Amino acid sequence: MVQLSLLLLVSAFAHSALSVYPLVDLGYSKFLGTAQSNGVTSWWGLRFAAPPLGNLRFSAPQAPLYNGTLQIANTHGPLCLATGGAPTDPTTSEDCLFLDVYAPSNATAASKLPVFIWIQGGGFNANSNGNYRGDGMILASGMDMVVVTFNYRVSLYGFLASQEVVAGGNTNVGLLDQRFAMEWVQKYITAFGGDPGHVTIGGCSAGGASITFQLTAYGGRDDGLFHAAAAESASVFTILTVEQSQYQYDALVERVGCNTTADTLACLREVNATTLQANNYNIPYPGLGPNASAPLFMYDAVIDGGFIQDFSQRQFAEGKFVKVPVIYGDDTNGGTDFAPQSTANYSQMDQFLIDNYPTMTPDQITAINYMYPEDMEFFNGTGAFWRTASNAYGEMAYLCPGMYVSTAYATYSTLGSWNYRYNVEDPTQMAEGYGVPHTVETAAIWGPQYVSGSPPASYWPNGTNADIVPVMQGYWTSFIRSYSPNTHRVLGSAVWQEWVPTTQDRIMVQTNATAMETVDINEQARCAYLTANSVFWEQ
Ligand SMILES: *[C@@H]1O[C@H](CO)[C@@H](O)[C@H](O)[C@H]1NC(C)=O
Ligand SMILES: *[C@@H]1O[C@H](CO)[C@@H](O)[C@H](O)[C@H]1NC(C)=O
Ligand SMILES: *[C@@H]1O[C@H](CO)[C@@H](O)[C@H](O)[C@H]1NC(C)=O
Ligand SMILES: *[C@@H]1O[C@H](CO)[C@@H](O)[C@H](O)[C@H]1NC(C)=O
Ligand SMILES: *[C@@H]1O[C@H](CO)[C@@H](O)[C@H](O)[C@H]1NC(C)=O
Ligand SMILES: *[C@@H]1O[C@H](CO)[C@@H](O)[C@H](O)[C@H]1NC(C)=O
Ligand SMILES: *[C@@H]1O[C@H](CO)[C@@H](O)[C@H](O)[C@H]1NC(C)=O
Ligand SMILES: *[C@@H]1O[C@H](CO)[C@@H](O)[C@H](O)[C@H]1NC(C)=O
Ligand SMILES: *[C@@H]1O[C@H](CO)[C@@H](O)[C@H](O)[C@H]1NC(C)=O
């Protein structure tokens, strides 16, 4: 009976011969999507790579095997296992390499619509922006684009690195998963109405860092997988070499009892995910002494001489990156989500910086303390130096590196380099002291109805910041459709001028007051210091 009704369903859709069928046959599997009443068809939970289990744990992704059973694509795939995640959390799984596709229901295989591939964040230790829905952006684009979201391996599953992993597996497999999803788009997106020759990659936080790593991958080799890039609040954490990462591997091996075996990698592949998760936690960088805490994000991309050949900042300085139109930018208070709220004085702030950037020297710490005088905004229940530490961390990890990339693109490429500061104040976030926090702009770009988590109440259609949603969607969908944020921007919104390294003009996004601004001269000076020194603290 079920099979009969499916057949009827399939033949019903076969009549509208010009539409993208909700049933898409990719050869290795057939996926039945859902045509929604808003004019967008969605396909959820498409397996894009073989399950990364057994011998594929710690190895590059492989093509999925043929499965002749019709896949009813109406359920998101589980998110990848996160650092510290409960072993039994049913929303996650080690078998997590799934993607979702959204397309206008009236698109055809001949439509060749611009494609947006979203790389979610989560500090490379979690999938934090999973299952965002592309409907809002497609509606905002006038049904002129296709959206792809996906999960990639994170934490130890995505970024374990050691000499054993190099010998018997692969490093940076989380980034290889991303690449694999992009290759999937090249092979299959036409069937959904998309144009493999017009692909924009975008992402926030570690998704923004992923944009950076994909732009600089293999020394900046252009594999034709994307044609524009938009990085939101891109993070730049400590980057270790494979050799420097060995302690993470050794500690894990010992924790799960694999230290008594000759082939520790084979042993780690035999341990089940429940046991791995029970032992999946961060430890401080070595040599930091008894006061150290674990960094916020321990597992991270590593310099492996292949996918990642150098600090990305150095590659940007040398022109070793794919030349495409780019947007980079950040929020006004990118550090407030991360600096410990209890931070009470400079010595605690400095310990936090050292915990996360362990090779900072005392001189560098002194300079940073000098650059960030005590912020006199205080919030109930928090330490006096929370905002001071946030200011330093926000500029160091997010804001200044983004400006650096904008400068590199403006210097080496003529295709367009745009920078933004997102400064939309939500009353609740302001009152709680978060200011305009990390990645909040994603809620405006996707629309508050279409993101996971809790977008600010003021962004909803009945809220005081509702008007910023169409403005941000206008810039982003314009960039995705035409490689410029201005072509299809919302009527009446400001022209977003390109970044010029000598003048440092960016767009400042604010409800009813979006306009170009010149970066404050003190901020320019702080960023100049930070980017001149960050490679020395292995950022
Ligand atoms: C094939 O797909 C069906 C439906 O999703 C699933 O139940 C089955 O486990 C799959 N088979 C294999 C070998 O993965
Ligand atoms: C799909 O609908 C949109 C908006 O209604 C329209 O602009 C577009 O031309 C249509 N596309 C096709 C292929 O019919
Ligand atoms: C393995 O690790 C355990 C737990 O730390 C330790 O007691 C044991 O001595 C180690 N064995 C070897 C061979 O290193
Ligand atoms: C995982 O392995 C542990 C230790 O061998 C075992 O006790 C446990 O039952 C296993 N869990 C699952 C879900 O297989
Ligand atoms: C650890 O912190 C305490 C209290 O702030 C301080 O007195 C001590 O010198 C610190 N120890 C090291 C090794 O940094
Ligand atoms: C910083 O604050 C902490 C917590 O209140 C306190 O224990 C420590 O002594 C302070 N350090 C300095 C140098 O004032
Ligand atoms: C500060 O927080 C405490 C505990 O949450 C609360 O009782 C108090 O009313 C708050 N004070 C102000 C001024 O908001
Ligand atoms: C605004 O809209 C949201 C979502 O529909 C709803 O949850 C919220 O209660 C509304 N707020 C007000 C003040 O009406
Ligand atoms: C923005 O402008 C609209 C239309 O003039 C107005 O209704 C709204 O209150 C303004 N919002 C803010 C936050 O200024």
Image (tube, grey):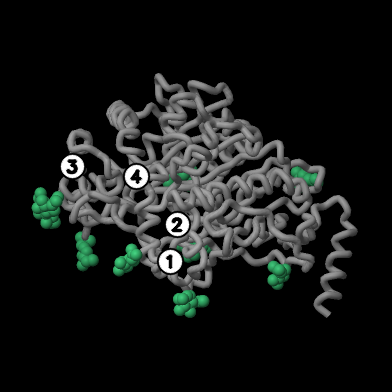
The secondary structure type at the circle numbered 2 is: helix
Residue at image location 88% in from the left, 53% down from the top: 17
Kindly tell me whether mark 2's CB lies below 8 Å from ligand 4: no
> Counting other residues with Cα less than 10 Å from the Cα at mark 1, is it few (<14), some (14-19), or many (20 or more)?
some
Label 2 vs label 3: CA separation?
34 Å
- For residue 333, the mark is 4
Label 1 vs label 2: CA separation?
10 Å
> Counting other residues with Cα less than 10 Å from the Cα at mark 3, is it few (<14), some (14-19), or many (20 or more)?
some
Which mark is in front, 1 or 2?
A: 2
Label 3 vs label 1: CA separation?
35 Å
Label 4 vs label 3: CA separation?
15 Å
The secondary structure type at the circle numbered 1 is: loop
Label 2 vs label 4: CA separation?
26 Å
- Asked whether the beta carbons under mark 1 and mark 2 sit within 8 Å of each other, the answer is yes
Residue furthest toward the top? 502
Residue furthest toward the bottom? 1
Residue at image location 78% in from the left, 61% down from the top: 30
Examine the rendering and report whether any part of residue 325 can be seen. Answer: no
Task: Provide residue 220's location: percent of width, then percent of height.
Answer: 54, 31
- For residue 374, the mark is 3
Label 1 vs label 4: CA separation?
27 Å
Query: Label 4 sits on what residue type?
Result: Asn
Q: Which residue is mark 1?
A: 85
| Left or right of 79 on screen, residue 524 | left
Residue at image location 21% in from the left, 57% down from the top: 342
Query: Label 2 sits on what residue type?
Result: Ser
Q: Which mark sits nearer the N-terminus, 2 or 3? A: 2
